[in-house]
Amino acid sequence: MSSIADIKSQLPMLLAQTVVIGVILYCVLVLFHNTQANLHARNIASGFGFMSVEGGLPINDTLASYDSSASYGYAFFMGILNTLFVSILGIIFATILGVLVGCARVSSNWLVSRVATVYVEILRNIPLLLTLFFTYSVVLSSLPQPRESFVPLTNVFVNNRGAFLPRPEFHADMIWVCMAMLGAGILSWYLVRRSRKMRDETGRGFYAGWMSLALCIGLPGITYLLAPASLTFDYAELHGFNFKGGMILRPEFCALLIGLVLYTGAFIAENVRSGIQSVPVGQIDAARALGLKPRLVMSKVVLPQTLRVCIPATINDYTSLVKNSSLAVAIGYPDMVSVGGTIIGQNDQAIEIIGLWMAVYLTINLVISLGMNWFNAKVQMVER
Amino acid sequence: MTTHSLEKKLLFTPSPSSPPPLEASGPIGWLRKNLFNSWFNSVLTILIVALLLKCIPPVISWAFIDAVWTGGPTACSPEGGACWAFIAAKFRILFVGTYPQDLIWRPMVAGILLVGMVAATVTEYVKNRYLILFWILLPLVALWLIGGGMGLTVVDQSMWGGLMLSLGLAAVGILISIPLGILFALGRQSSIISVRTLCIGFIELIRGVPLITILFMASVMMPLFLPQNLQINNLLRVQVGIILFSSAYIAEVVRGGLQAIPQGQIDAAKALGLNYWKITLLVVMPQALKHVLPSLIGRCIALFKDTSLVIIVGLLDFLGMAKAASQDQVWLGHDAECYIFCAAVYWCICFGMSRYGRSLERRGPQK
């Protein structure tokens, strides 16, 4: 009896479900049919077979060795690597800049907070693409010719062809330095744990932080001094009109990185500012009254609460930085979208390439969200 | 001695308090409190002042003192100051693109209408209900004025461009994507599982990919999806892409507002016998939208900035026209002036909107 009533009450819902699913299926079928007809009429192949075909794409800025006889698939993979590279560097530098500017905005120094405010308000209210164009075609192209390079450090040359840095070359002995690094890492992890445990039990720890810092710098350093052949540098040298050798950061890459960092940094600065301002002043006074040193007030009272407020918004800024790295296509840095766009121009297989773009961006953003949500869960208040 | 004079003598009259020391109250006090309150801040202040003194005078002399305001391409030299004459020469192209010279009054009237509407909104000269009606009517009128038809000469869409195109894409995008976004937000909370799944999938897919891929999709992939005899021009396809993109973000903003409505209100409305649509339209939505108005304005700013990406699929909006103008063979080498002017215009519009949003936020959701 009751089951019949159940079914009766669910009938409208079931009907709605069926109608919605039917409409969707019909739309998908129509789209599929249209697409098939269009592809056939325009003589466009489908499927991912083209990925192994020799592409002949000239890509001037890759992280791994590449020549234009490589396949489309390999070229696209180089694009993905470039996207990841610029995104990771961008996230690191934007975080540093954002935290500095965010702290500057709440500084008691009037001039510092004004300068920070001007920076944030200007960068946030101008399209990123405009910042990129400006950096690329005004700032970077006004740098000097290679012969009159600007030399900020020895063996570092900055000119309108890019920034030339020494390229590190690793040799067989490097394995010892790596092992020393690994050992130092494990040892300092143990030290920090031990100190925390001691402090929990006896109320008195030891200087684990400083000790592990010394370990992490000292141990690999000593190993390197013992085996100096493990790491050599290839320096850039001026030959004729341009530099040869070394590691080059091309203007397109520099412009993209600078633009992304300046733009996202302004947004992160706002998160940091609102995070810091969300901590009531009374708490800081109370912590001081308890006799905590300024460093402890910062690390135990202000920072944990600031992180809680600013992490969710910062996750969004990180994912939008990754998405914004696709603007590389506008200034000619060969990222995934730029390489994919060239492939579409050659064989018209837009559906496959756009599908790949979406899959890669969704994966990257999913990884960022998962990682940051894990971090967020760690810093959120544990209510007891 | 009378009692009166005795009282007068015994009464305590404090001497007037002396003014605070000059170094704590005057400009010196201000300097000490705000610029030199610790050795670290003093060092920072001196560094920043030195930096500003080094940077600002050359910029001012470039932008104003040495600048060329009128004249042709020969009046500007690359060594001199800014060449604002270049902007003056390109003014029309930057604002309306290649729109026919003799019909220029039509975009101008549309622009004046837009400015009037903005003024009416900010000063609250017009009441809420009419305001929404006017804002819906404005793009239609502007479209008629700019595009022609119904008594006006038709101007082909390939001639639309410049700031006019940016504003148009953003305005139409926002006006259509707000109702669409509300529908998606409601769909996301629907009790019909297939609708909910579809909405969540759509919103998360769109929010997970860059606008450029959506624009590429609209520009390259959409023609493949349509029936063979149906042709839609590129501008409309891009507009559809922008609307889809924006509606996914607006759906998330609206969801925030929906979640701020206490369940008790919905229960109360149900107890009064209202059905789903009445509850949504009369009880939930008005409150939810008031809650998220500042965030919605934030989305408007973001969308307006994002319209600059249409340059990548071949439309010449404000930034696109600026880039094209800076590559003019006759006026070569004025990229800086062009981009600075462009940035100033974008900044004024976006900063104005964000100020308006902030003032709404300060007033709070209760009106």
Image: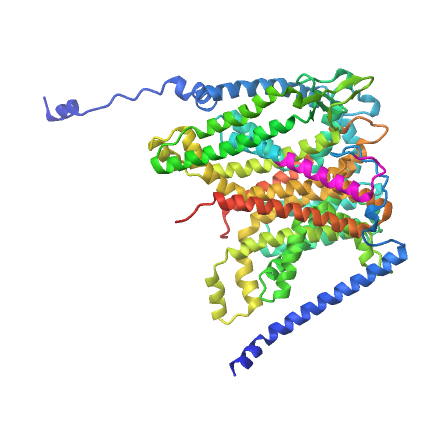
Residue A344 % position (x, y)? 82, 46
Span colored in magenta: A66-91
A82 in magenta: yes
Dividing the picture into quarters, in which one does residue A85 lie? top right
Q: Nearer the viewer, residue B234 or A149?
A: A149
**Residue A310: within the magenta?**
no
**Residue most extreme to the left:** B1
Residue A292 drawn above or below residue A29: above
Is residue B315 at all visible to an observer of this figure? no
Q: Position of residue B317 (x, y in %)?
A: 76, 42
**x, y percent for residue B96:** 78, 41
Identify the residue at horizontal 61%, vertical 34% (top origin): A92
Q: Residue at x 46, y 63 (%)?
A: B264
Q: On the picture, is B71 further left or further right than B111?
A: right
Front one among A216 and B30: A216
Residue B339, image x, y percentages: 73, 32
